[in-house]
C-alpha cells in the first residue's frame, strides 16, 4: 500500500521533488548538506561558515577513522565535503555520511581536533522504546491523532487499560446540539457554521478521544450528509445526529439501529420521514429508500456471510442474496408513518402517525412476516429485532469497523474473532459495541509488531483524520477561541473530504473499494483510495505545505516551540516527529531524505529553526509512512 501511495506521489507535480521511497541505499541515515554551509579545505584547516577549524586527515577512502570522544568529521574532496559528528570507529566510506559527494574520485576523511570540537547544541536522541512506539500506534488507530503527552501517558499503561479508561470517560460537553443552539439567529452564517465549529472542537480537544473516533467511524457507516439533501442548511440536524451516534458509540447495536432509524436527520436524508402507506386506488407504494439502505449498509449487507465475513455459496458456487424485492417492499411498509415529534424537533426521535402507517402484512428478511393489523411501533420493533439478530450482522459490521480503525484487509480469522465477540460479549449480550471495539483494538493483528512487515496490513489515513492529527499533535489553537473550519472538500485546494459532507449514502468511499492495479489484482481492498488520485494528492500536498507554515486560515495556529528548540539537530527533530506522527515507523531512507532537505536551511539563517520545523512537518505528513497507518 505504501508503494502505491509513493507511485501516485511521483506522478503528481509536487512542490518538492523528494521521491521519498526511491532514495538510494547509500543515503540511509545520511547527513548530506546540499546547499549547506560551505566546507573548504585549506591545508589542515577547514572553513565552516567562514570560520577556520583545525583538522587533520584521519583516513583515505575505504580506511577507518578512530575517534576518542565526539568529532566533527568531513568526507569527500575540496568543494564537495560532507560532514557530521561521530564517536568511536567510523569507516571513511560509511553510508552514514550520506550520498557519495564525488563518485569515482579518491576521497579523504578529516576530523577536527579536540580543542575545536563543536558538538550540536541539541544532543542526539535516545532510541525510541517499544512502549513508546506501541502507545503511539494505538493512539493513531483509536484517536484523532497521537500527541506527545498522551503517548507518554499511554506508554505507562497496557493497551487494555488505556481502552478501559477511555470507555469510562463521559461525553464531551457541551453537546453539538447545545452548541448550535447557542450560536446566532437561525439562518445566519454564524448559526449555519456552528456545527462544524463544534465538531472540530470536540475532535481535537475532546478528552473522550476513543468515543470521538468511534463516532466518526459510525458516521461513515450510518451516513447522513449535507450534500444534495434536505438538511444541507440545518446545522441542528447534523448536531443532533452526531450527538446520537456519540451517545450510542459504546452502547448496544440494536438500540443504535433504532435511534438511527428514528432520527429526523436520517428520516429526511433517506426520505422515510412522512413516508405514506400504500394506496391501491392510486397505485401509490411506500418509499423504499431507507428500507434498502438499512439492510444493505446498516445491518446485513447484500450477501449471506459466514462468520469470518466470507460469502456463502449455493450449490452452483454463486453467492446467496440476503434479500430480494419482496423483502424491500415489506421493510418499506415498516418505515411508514414516522414524522417529527414536535416542530422541527431534531433532537427527539420521530413519532408514529397511525393515519399514514401501513398495517398490511409485511414480509421481511429471514422469512419473518409481520401480521396484518400490527401497529407502526410494533412493526418497527419486529423488523429491527429481526435485522439485529440476523447472523450476517456480526461479520458484516465487525469487518467494517476493523477497516475504520486498523486495516483495510483483515484476515478472515480476525473478522471471525471480532464477530464472535459481537455475537456474545462474554456475558450473553449481543451487539455490545464497547466489547467489539475493545476486541478490534486488542487483537493480535492490531497490536503485534510482526504485522508491520506485512505489506497487506494497514490502511490509508483519511485526509480529515490527517488534518485532525496535525491540529492535535502541534497543539493548534484558534486565536479567537472559535474552531472556524469548513470548506475542506475541494480536492484541488484542500482535503477533498469534509465531515458530514459525503457525496452519497455510500460515504466518501465504499468499504470494498479496490483501486485498479496491484491492489485489485491481489484481491485486496483499499477504501480510502476511492478519494485518492493525482488531483487529491496535489491538493493535500499544497494544503499541508500551507498548513505547516501558516496554520489554518491564519486563525488556527500551531505551537512549534518544542520542535524549534531541537531543530539544529535534524536527527533529534525527526525522532520526535517519527514517534508522534508515524509511531516510530519512519524508514531510514525517508529520514535521510528529509534530513537532506532540512540541511539546505543552515541554522545560521534567520528563522532557520522555524523553517526547518515547517519543512520537516510537511515532509513527514506527506510521506508514505505517515499517509499509510500501520
Image: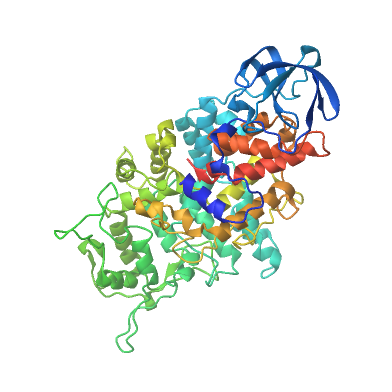
Horizontally, residue 409 falls left or right of residue 101, namely left
**Residue 263 seen in the figure:** yes
Residue in the foreground of this view, choosing between 488 and 375: 488
- Residue 461: percent from the left, percent from the top? 52, 48
Residue at 49% across, 63% down: 224
Residue in the foreground of this view, choosing between 171 and 448: 448
Residue in the foreground of this view, choosing between 339 and 561: 561
Horizontally, residue 439 falls left or right of residue 307, namely right
- Residue 465: percent from the left, percent from the top? 56, 49
Quadrant assignment, res 392: bottom left
Quadrant assignment, res 472: top right
**Residue 499 seen in the figure:** no
- Residue 173: percent from the left, percent from the top? 61, 48
Residue at the outermost front position: 105
Residue in the foreground of this view, choosing between 356 and 470: 470
In the image, is residue 296 above or below residue 416? below
Horizontally, residue 108 falls left or right of residue 304, namely right
Total numbered labels: 0
- Residue 490: percent from the left, percent from the top? 61, 63
Residue at 31% across, 37% down: 426
Amino acid at each position: 500500500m505504501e508503494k502505491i501511495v509513493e507511485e501516485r506521489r511521483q506522478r503528481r507535480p509536487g512542490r518538492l521533488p523528494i521521491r521519498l521511497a526511491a532514495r538510494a541505499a547509500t543515503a540511509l541515515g545520511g547527513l548530506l548538506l546540499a546547499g549547506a554551509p560551505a566546507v573548504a579545505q585549506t591545508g589542515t584547516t577547514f572553513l565552516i561558515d567562514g570560520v577556520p577549524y583545525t583538522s587533520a586527515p584521519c583516513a583515505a577512502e575505504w580506511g577507518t577513522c578512530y575517534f576518542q570522544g565526539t568529532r566533527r568529521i568531513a568526507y569527500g574532496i575540496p568543494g564537495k565535503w560532507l560532514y557530521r559528528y561521530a564517536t568511536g570507529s567510523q569507516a571513511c566510506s560509511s553510508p552514514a555520511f550520506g550520498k557519495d559527494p564525488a563518485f569515482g574520485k579518491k576521497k579523504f576523511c578529516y576530523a577536527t581536533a579536540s580543542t575545536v570540537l563543536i558538538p550540536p547544541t541539541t544532543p542526539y536522541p535516545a532510541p525510541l522504546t517499544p512502549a513508546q512506539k506501541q502507545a503511539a500506534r494505538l493512539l493513531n488507530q483509536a484517536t484523532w491523532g497521537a500527541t506527545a503527552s498522551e503517548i507518554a501517558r499511554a506508554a505507562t499503561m497496557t493497551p487494555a487499560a488505556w481502552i478501559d479508561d477511555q470507555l469510562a470517560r463521559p461525553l464531551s460537553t457541551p453537546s453539538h446540539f447545545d452548541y448550535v443552539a447557542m450560536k446566532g439567529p437561525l439562518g445566519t452564517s454564524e448559526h449555519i457554521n456552528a456545527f462544524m465549529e463544534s465538531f472540530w472542537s470536540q475532535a481535537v480537544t475532546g478528552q473522550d478521544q476513543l468515543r470521538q473516533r468511534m463516532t466518526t467511524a459510525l458516521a461513515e457507516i450510518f451516513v447522513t450528509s449535507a450534500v444534495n439533501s434536505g438538511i444541507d442548511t440545518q446545522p441542528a440536524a447534523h448536531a443532533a445526529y452526531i450527538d446520537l451516534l456519540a451517545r450510542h458509540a459504546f452502547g448496544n447495536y440494536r438500540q443504535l439501529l433504532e435511534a438511527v432509524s428514528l432520527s429526523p436527520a436520517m428520516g429526511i436524508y433517506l426520505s422515510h420521514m412522512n413516508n405514506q402507506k400504500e394506496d391501491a386506488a392510486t397505485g401509490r407504494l411506500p418509499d423504499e429508500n431507507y428500507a434498502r439502505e438499512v439492510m444493505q449498509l446498516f445491518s446485513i449487507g447484500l450477501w449471506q456471510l459466514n462468520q469470518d465475513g466470507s460469502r456463502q455459496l449455493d450449490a452452483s458456487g454463486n453467492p446467496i442474496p440476503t434479500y430480494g424485492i419482496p423483502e424491500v417492499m415489506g421493510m418499506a411498509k415498516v418505515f411508514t408513518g414516522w414524522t417529527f415529534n414536535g416542530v422541527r424537533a431534531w433532537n427527539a426521535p420521530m413519532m408514529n402517525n397511525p393515519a399514514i402507517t401501513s398495517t398490511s402484512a409485511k414480509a421481511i428478511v429471514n422469512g419473518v412476516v409481520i401480521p396484518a393489523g400490527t401497529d407502526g411501533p410494533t412493526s418497527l420493533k419486529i423488523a429491527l429485532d429481526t435485522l439485529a439478530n440476523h447472523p450476517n450482522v456480526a461479520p458484516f459490521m465487525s469487518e467494517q469497523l476493523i477497516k475504520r480503525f486498523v486495516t483495510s484487509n483483515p484476515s478472515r480469522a480476525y473478522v471471525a474473532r471480532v464477530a464472535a465477540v459481537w455475537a456474545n460479549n462474554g456475558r450473553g449480550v449481543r451487539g455490545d459495541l464497547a466489547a467489539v471495539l475493545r476486541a478490534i483494538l486488542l487483537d493480535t493483528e492490531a497490536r503485534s509488531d510482526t504485522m508491520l512487515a506485512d505489506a497487506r496490513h494497514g490502511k490509508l489515513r483519511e485526509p480529515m483524520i490527517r488534518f485532525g492529527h496535525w491540529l492535535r499533535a502541534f497543539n493548534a489553537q484558534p486565536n479567537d477561541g472559535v474552531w472556524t473550519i469548513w470548506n475542506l472538500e475541494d480536492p484541488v485546494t484542500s482535503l477533498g473530504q469534509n465531515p458530514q459532507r459525503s457525496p452519497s449514502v455510500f460515504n466518501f468511499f465504499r468499504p470494498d473499494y479496490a483501486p485498479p492495479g496491484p491492489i485489485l489484482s491481489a484481491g485486496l481492498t483499499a477504501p480510502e483510495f476511492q478519494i485518492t488520485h493525482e488531483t487529491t494528492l496535489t491538493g493535500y500536498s499544497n494544503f499541508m505545505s500551507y498548513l505547516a507554515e501558516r496554520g489554518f486560515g491564519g486563525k488556527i495556529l500551531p505551537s512549534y516551540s518544542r520542535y524549534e528548540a531541537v531543530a539544529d539537530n535534524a536527527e533529534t527533530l525527526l525522532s520526535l516527529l517519527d514517534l508522534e506522527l508515524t509511531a516510530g515507523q519512519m524508514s531510514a531512507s525517508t529520514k535521510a531524505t528529509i534530513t537532506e532537505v532540512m540541511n539546505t536551511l543552515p541554522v545560521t539563517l534567520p528563522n532557520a529553526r522555524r523553517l526547518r520545523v515547517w519543512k520537516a512537518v510537511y515532509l513527514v505528513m506527506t510521506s508514505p509512512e505517515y499517509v499509510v497507518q500501520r
